[in-house]
Amino acid sequence: MKKIIYYVATSIDGFIAGPNEDISGFVASGEGVNTYLEDLKDFKTVIMGRKTYEFGYKYGLVAGQPAYPHMQHYIFSLGLQFENQSSQVHICKLEVDIVKDLKAKSETDIYMCGGGKFAGWLLDHELIDVVKIKFNPLVLGDGIRLFGTSKKPHQLKLLSSKAFEDGLTINEYQIQYL
């Protein structure tokens, strides 16, 4: 069974975006970002919530098309529909069995793109295996939390850590469900 890897940028106080989905303070270029982009090449499957998919519209994503051309996209939403939907884009109900089936059938580990609410749901159902966090050198104070409203405690085991000159640090953790 393949792993779900939540690979996400966050402020040091745990927000994946500020108020109004603002990400302008996050590191947008440099060695750390290049590492992230290179890592994405290892995935053939991406999962995300509807809000994360629609967030891409601000950056030129066309509705119904893949955000990552080399990946199959599974967007978890009850009401999302597209007129011109790519064969790489699949709309799914938010159900544990559907996520487990994806983990069983995927060729590679699965890139969990976001967002916080979806990540919290996956965490609460013990479906995320690894969290790979790009810690950005800023404090946002408010916004979209890394794991939404999830309140369950979990232990993490540090697998790797790498710091970059631009202040970005990428830490990889295995979640140890109790």
Image (spheres, rainbow, N blue to C red):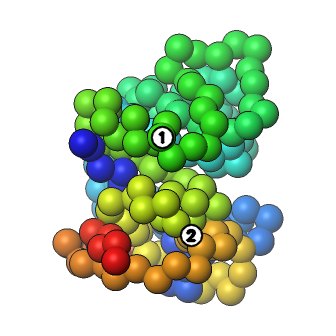
Give above or below for 152 relative to 34.
below
Q: Select label 2 or label 1 by which is in front.
A: 1
Is residue 69 shown left or right of residue 1? right
Coordinates of residue 67 in the picture (x, y in percent):
54, 34
Coordinates of residue 146 in the picture (x, y in percent):
56, 70
Q: Residues within 10 Å of mark 1 (few under 14, many from 20)?
A: few
| Element at label 2 | loop
Coordinates of residue 81 in the picture (x, y in percent):
75, 24
| Element at label 1 | helix
The answer to whether the residue labelled 2 contacts the one labelled 1, judged by CB atoms less than 8 Å apart, is no
**Label 1 belongs to which residue?**
97
Can the viewer see residue 17?
Answer: yes
Q: Nearer the viewer, residue 131 or 55?
A: 131
Is residue 96 shown left or right of residue 3? right
**Label 2 belongs to which residue?**
147
Give above or below for 83 relative to 165.
above
Earlier residue among tags 2 and 1: 1
> Which residue corresponds to the image point at 56% horizontal and 24% vertical from the top-left?
89
Can the viewer see residue 26?
Answer: no
Coordinates of residue 123 in the picture (x, y in percent):
48, 64
Q: Amino acid at mark 2?
A: Phe
Query: Which image quadrant for residue 79?
Result: top right
- Quarter of the picture containing the C terminus is bottom left
> Which residue corresponds to the image point at 71% horizontal and 65% vertical from the top-left?
22
